[in-house]
Image: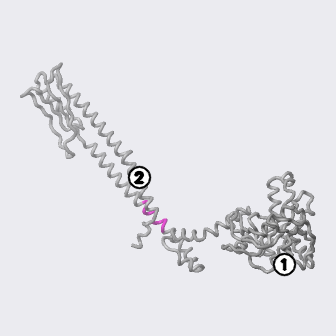
Amino acid sequence: MNNLKWILQPLSGFAVGMLLVLNLSLYFFWYVPGLKNLISATDQLGSSLVRNLAFESTSPLHASDRAALSDLLNRVADEPAVLSASVSAEEEGGIQLTSRVKRQAEGNGRHYQFPIHFSEELLGTAQLNLSEYDLMQWQSQAVTSWVLFNLLSVAGLGAFIYLRTQKHEKQWRKISSLIDTEFPELSAELSGTPDQQLQQLMERLNDPLSQQMQLLRYMRHDSITDDTERLLEQIELVSNEGSYQDVALLSIQCQNWEQLIRTYSAPGLQALWSDYETLMIRTGELYSGILLPDGFSLAFGLNEENQFAFNAVCAARVLQIAMEKLYAEHTQLRPVFGISVSAGPAFVSKTHKHGIPLPLVTGDAETWLAQIKALQPMGQIFFAEPLLQFEDVNQQVEASIVRDITLRDGYRLEVWELDKLRFKDDLLTTQANTLINTNRQ
């Protein structure tokens, strides 16, 4: 029974169904119309012959000339398709003549008759039997052709399905042996035919493959780049479960967007923008920041690092130095960014953008960040006062207060501008230069 498993597959059912449809089509659109045409042609021939016999029999029958009638009947019976012909007078005891009868083994033939009139008088009836040999011969050949066609079709489809199955099994054995060696646990979960096992394998790999392909499409590359690998590593840092925790948020804003649109073409602006996207991604990797769905914000502290607030400030300073250097190196108009940083409690969940699982942050930290962004810093770093409550930040930043904002709930939020980081600015400048040089390679 195991040797016949190649028959039990969807392709076999599809082939049988198509063969059935083809047979029904041949029956209703070829056999039935062909048979009707042959019967109609036979009936036309029989009607024509019996009418001619009745016409030619009128004079001999009226004259009661038996010899002439006998000669006429035998002459009509000599036609290949005619089995017998007869003439019978209408009057009682009149002439009743029949031609010689041909032997035939296909039945009694098809019977035709026609009245014989002389003026208004009915003299008798002409009768004719036509052979059904040609009709039965066509039917026999049609059935033989149908049987041969189906046998050849079944043999051809069976051979195709068998060879196809053997080929798939041979290919699958190579994949299966590799899976058995490298992923024994996954191999134990696969069962069924090679097609079914392959489908099960693709279902298990579907989500990761979909995420990576969406990511590649988003990055507009045909192969995995360094930036793509960095974002794929960020995916692993996103938890599937929501949490309420302290985080630090960093966001950059382009303050001369309308001027850039009027200056650059769409492809040129896209190429320019990709440099800053790459700079953002690599800075996030350097300081354990994870990209947020808007593409120009980073979240720190999702992996429970103790220095996440200080890392956010360092990342902001690196971005500021790098952007200032990029702006100074080019004579063409470049984007002018402002940087906003906040820290505080927030609810962190997961969302998807372009198939990439990214964190979604809501809460005080996000609200305070929005208030800072509304001040539209240009080439500056504005941060919320709660950042200064972190000891490592408080000890190393040099900053000046910018504004005191009253929030809707009555809470007062101080906004500060970062001037520099004590003991760290030289290192941060080196890091910014390294990131710029890496982008150019």
Quarter of the figure with residue 279 = bottom right
The stretch drawn in magenta includes residue 76: no
Quarter of the figure with residue 281 = bottom right
Amino acid type assigned to the residue bearing label 2 in the image: Val
- Seen from the viewer's position, the closer of residues 56 and 27 is 27
Which quadrant of the rendered structure holds the C terminus? bottom right
Q: Is residue 204 above or below residue 20?
A: below
Left/right placement of residue 243 relative to residue 181 reads right
* Residue depth check, mark 1 versus mark 2: number of the one nearer the observer: 1
Helix, strand or loop under label 1: loop
Is tag 1's residue or tag 2's residue first in the polypeptide sequence?
A: 2
Left/right placement of residue 388 relative to residue 189 reads right
Amino acid type assigned to the residue bearing label 1 in the image: Phe
Instruction: List x then y, in percent, for residue 393.
Output: 87, 77
Q: Which residue is mark 1?
A: 390
- Seen from the viewer's position, the closer of residues 351 and 267 is 351
Instruction: List x then y, in percent, for residue 379.
Output: 90, 64
Residue 436 is at least partly visible in this image: no
Residue found farthest to the front: 410
Helix, strand or loop under label 2: helix
Report the magenta residues as a range: 156-165
Q: Is residue 66 above or below residue 211?
A: above
Q: Which residue is mark 2?
A: 21
Residue found farthest to the left: 93
- Seen from the viewer's position, the closer of residues 182 and 338 is 338
Quarter of the figure with residue 320 = bottom right
Main SS of the magenta part reads helix
Residue lying at 21% horizontally and 41% vertically, measured from the top left = 109
Instruction: List x then y, in percent, for residue 160.
Output: 46, 62
